[in-house]
Amino acid sequence: MLKIEGFSINRGNEKIMLISDMIIGSGMRVNLFGDNDTGRSLFLAAVHGEYKNFGGNILIKDKPLSFYKKKKKTILIDNNFHLLPDETVWKNITIPLSQVTTRQKQKILEFCKTANLSDKIGDKVKNLSSSAMKFIELIRAVIQLPQIILIDDLDNYFDDKNLVKAMDISNFAIHGGTSLIATSKRKLDILDVHYRVQEHRVVKL
Amino acid sequence: MFFQISMVFLIILAWNMLFVGFELQKEEHYDNISSSPMIILSMQEETLIQLKDNLDTYSFIENITIIQDSVIAQTLIREYDLEQNTEILSSYILPTAMELRFKGEEFNELQKKELERTLLGYSPSVIYYHDNASWEKHQNKLLVLTKGYITGFGFCLIFTIFISIFLRIHFAMKSSKFWKIYYSAGGYPGKRKRQFLFNTLLLCTIPIILNLLAYYTLRYFNLLKVAIDFRLFVLELITLIFSYTVTRIILRKSLK
């Protein structure tokens, strides 16, 4: 699914992140953890195609990122909230969907139940907690079954209990072949594969 | 979208009404010019017949009627109740008259001069009477009306361009946040461009189609006497296409 070779992010003359080789298969749940300022967010932005000032190659299904310029491949859930605050939970979840199928509707309702959003589905998003907002973004990403879901600072918004719920929701996409890459400050045991950023190098544990 | 379509529809409607108003007023002046005939008198009927043949070639003359002296005499007797003086009247030699009626829309200054030149060639055997003051009054009003219409037309053109561009940019800016979130949420790349194109198609066609429908409905029920030049609708369509092309160029970066 995702193949990274000789990847590097530079800040001036200093290399802040080096990945010699990383292969992430379909349906894998990967955790990349490390301290602040280690380039985790830039790595996700690079995979997403938003950050281009990096060295090496990123290939998704053996195709370079430029191939996916006009095709949906990854969904990035970053540290900002990408929601319409005056719209309802339902509207925010279904924004990218041209039409909501019965199965999607059923799944959304199911995920909302898992995320304790069932009774808030008609509420405006601005009245919700940060955690609930991140759940909305996660459900919205999962329901689209992209090739890769990228989540930045997963542990920032979800405590251990909510993390379990988030993984429950993600499993729908994971079983459909989507890979998940989540960054965090600490190792998240709930994920399957772990990479640590140490001394600017990304090491597989 | 509904608001934009309604606004453009109303502007185009106003533009068409300007045309209709102009045509109605013009028609009124043309009718007034047509209803004021020129009377040519001559003692020799042959001269008038010869003149008639000559004037028949002028397209701005709607019709020519020769009124013989006997008809004039009968008319005078009937109009002024002169039955007991028939003999006195018959002792006078009355002239033959010729009445010219003009096509108001064609009988302007150039044609009038041409006609006067022709009549001068028959002078002094013919004399003519025409209400020049009325003709000049209507010509002046037509001139003012035409100038007013051209100004109004220009205003409508610029106003349509301005409003359609302004509204489009305003609503595009307003929806920018939505599109930003749409894309970050994983929405289909290029959807905004396609949506813009689709909306452009609606904004160009629906107001024009609605105006055409209104126009043909009014014509069908004989509620509108004036026919709108179809080229006006084409021009309005071109104006809208131009406006939205300019808008597309202005918004090229936002639509990416």
Image (cartoon, coloured by chain):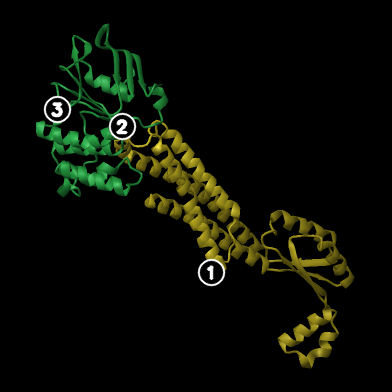
Chain colours: A green, B yellow
Using the image as rendered, state which of residue A31 and residue B95 is in the foreground.
A31
**Do the numbered discs 2 and 3 sit on residues whose CB atoms are within 8 Å?**
no
Front position among marks 2 and 3: 2
**Do the numbered discs 1 and 2 sit on residues whose CB atoms are within 8 Å?**
no
Query: Which quarter shows the C terminus of chain B?
Result: top left
**The disc numbered 3 marks a residue on which chain?**
A
Using the image as rendered, state which of residue B54 and residue B62 is in the foreground.
B62
Q: CA distance from mark 1 to mark 2?
A: 67 Å
Q: Residue furthest top?
A: A13
Residue underneath mark 1: B223
**The disc numbered 2 marks a residue on which chain?**
A
**Do the numbered discs 1 and 3 sit on residues whose CB atoms are within 8 Å?**
no
Using the image as rendered, state which of residue B16 and residue B87 is in the foreground.
B16
Q: Is residue B199 above or below residue B23?
A: above
Residue A41 pos. (x, y %): 23, 21
Hey, what amino acid is under mark 2? Gly
Residue underneath mark 3: A155
Q: Are marks 1 and 2 on the same chain?
A: no
Hey, what amino acid is under mark 1? Leu
Q: Is residue A8 above or below residue A45?
A: above
Mark drawn on residue A177: 2
